[in-house]
Each structure stands twice: as structure tokens, then as C-alpha cells.
């Protein structure tokens, strides 16, 4: 009455040592495949910036500057000035940090300056923080001062005073004749 259907035999997968191409990661489609949507490049759309990573087994001595995104999982001795910065749980910075967005999960010994600064529960920060927006999770260690920096509106210029029809005051000498 019921018949069991046979499943097709599995296709053999190429071995890594056979010199064949490496299959894509499970969450990333292969370029040109139907699952990969074609991106239309428009001049008004900003190009996506890639995240640069300093891995946990690397140590860097010197300053880092740039406009891109950086994740630090290793150790840096020097100042860091980038667009967005994430200090991972194994990351350490000994120097001043400046970025629009700073997320600290690891260790920073030095000042932090940014528009938005987040200290996650595993963070260790020893230094002053200047930020427009600031959040500190429970468990994060922080020693230093927080200065809330806001963009200041330009100072209003005083309106010019209208010319008065009154004559300018005169100074009159009230001393009598001297003898």
C-alpha cells in the first residue's frame, strides 16, 4: 500500500587537497550565482567600507589613522584615529583613541574622543572620555572623567544699533574760575 521511495545517492564532495575551487562560506553566496543579488552602483550611494581587523595574535607599535572602520583584537601602542572603532574582548590600546563611533569590549589606557562611545560589560578604560553620547554597561570598568561634548551653535551676532537722532553727550567743565 505504501511504498518507500529511494533517496538519490549523495554526490561526492571534492577534497580540499584535490586542487579544486573552495566552496563559498555558508552565509555568503558565490559571486555571479543567482542567490547573489546584483548591486547597482549609483553615484549618490556611498560605497560600503570594509572592516579592517588587527587579529589577536598581532602587536602594533605606532599610530593608526584613517577614515575607515577598524576592529582591534590584538595590541596597539600608539594613538588611533579612524572613522569607527571596535576594541574586541582580546584587544588592547595604549594611547589616545578618536573616532565617530567607539565600542570598547577590551582594554584602553588613554583618552577616548568620539560622537558615540559605548563601554560594553567586558570593557576596561583608564582615561578621560569626551563624547556627545555615552553608554556604560554594568560590569564595565572605567576610571577617569567624562566630558560631554556637544556641537555648539554659532554665536548670534548682535544686531546693529539704529542711529539715534540725539546729539552725542558733551563734557562740561563745572569748575569755577581759578584765582
Image (cartoon, rainbow, N blue to C red):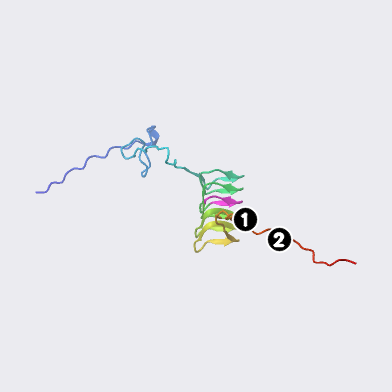
> At 18% from the left edge and 43% from the top edge, which residue is drawn?
6
Q: Which residues are magenta?
A: 91-100
Determine which quarter of the picture holds residue 39. Answer: top left
> At 57% from the left edge and 47% from the top edge, which residue is drawn?
81
Which quarter of the rendered picture does the C terminus lie within?
bottom right
Residue 163's disc is 1
Rounded to the nearest angstrom, the CA distance separating label 2 from label 1 is: 14 Å
Say few, some or many: other residues with alpha carbon within 10 Å of mark 2 (under 14 / 14 to 19 / 20 or more). few
| In the displayed structure image, the side of residue 166 where residue 24 appears, left or right | left
Marker count (numbered): 2
Taking depth in this image into account, of 22 and 31 the one nearest to the observer is: 31
Give the x, y percent position of residue 74: 54, 48
Q: Which residue is mark 2?
A: 169
Decide: is 177 above or below 59: below
Give the x, y percent position of residue 116: 51, 55
Taking depth in this image into account, of 57 and 124 the one nearest to the observer is: 124
Which numbered disc, 2 or 1, marks the residue that appears first in the sequence? Answer: 1
Decide: is 161 above or below 177: above
| In the displayed structure image, the side of residue 8 where residue 86 appears, left or right | right
Q: Secondary structure under badge 1?
A: loop
Q: Is residue 92 magenta?
A: yes
Residue 56's disc is none
Give the x, y percent position of residue 87: 52, 51
> At 69% from the left edge and 58% from the top edge, which residue is drawn?
168
Amino acid at each position: 500500500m505504501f511504498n518507500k521511495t529511494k533517496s538519490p545517492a549523495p554526490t561526492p564532495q571534492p577534497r580540499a587537497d584535490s586542487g579544486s575551487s573552495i566552496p563559498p562560506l555558508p552565509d555568503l553566496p558565490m559571486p555571479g550565482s543567482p542567490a547573489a543579488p546584483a548591486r547597482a552602483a549609483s553615484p549618490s550611494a556611498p560605497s560600503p567600507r570594509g572592516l579592517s581587523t588587527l587579529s589577536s595574535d598581532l602587536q602594533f607599535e605606532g599610530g593608526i589613522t584613517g577614515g575607515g572602520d577598524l576592529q582591534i583584537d590584538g595590541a596597539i601602542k600608539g594613538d588611533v584615529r579612524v572613522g569607527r572603532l571596535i576594541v574586541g574582548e582580546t584587544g588592547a590600546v595604549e594611547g589616545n583613541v578618536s573616532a565617530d563611533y567607539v565600542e570598547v569590549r577590551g582594554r584602553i589606557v588613554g583618552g577616548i574622543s568620539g560622537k558615540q562611545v559605548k563601554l560594553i560589560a567586558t570593557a576596561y578604560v583608564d582615561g578621560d572620555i569626551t563624547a556627545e553620547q555615552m553608554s556604560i554597561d554594568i560590569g564595565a570598568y572605567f576610571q577617569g572623567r567624562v566630558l560631554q561634548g556637544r556641537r555648539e551653535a554659532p554665536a548670534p551676532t548682535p544686531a546693529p544699533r539704529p542711529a539715534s537722532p540725539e546729539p552725542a553727550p558733551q563734557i562740561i567743565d563745572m569748575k569755577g574760575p581759578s584765582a
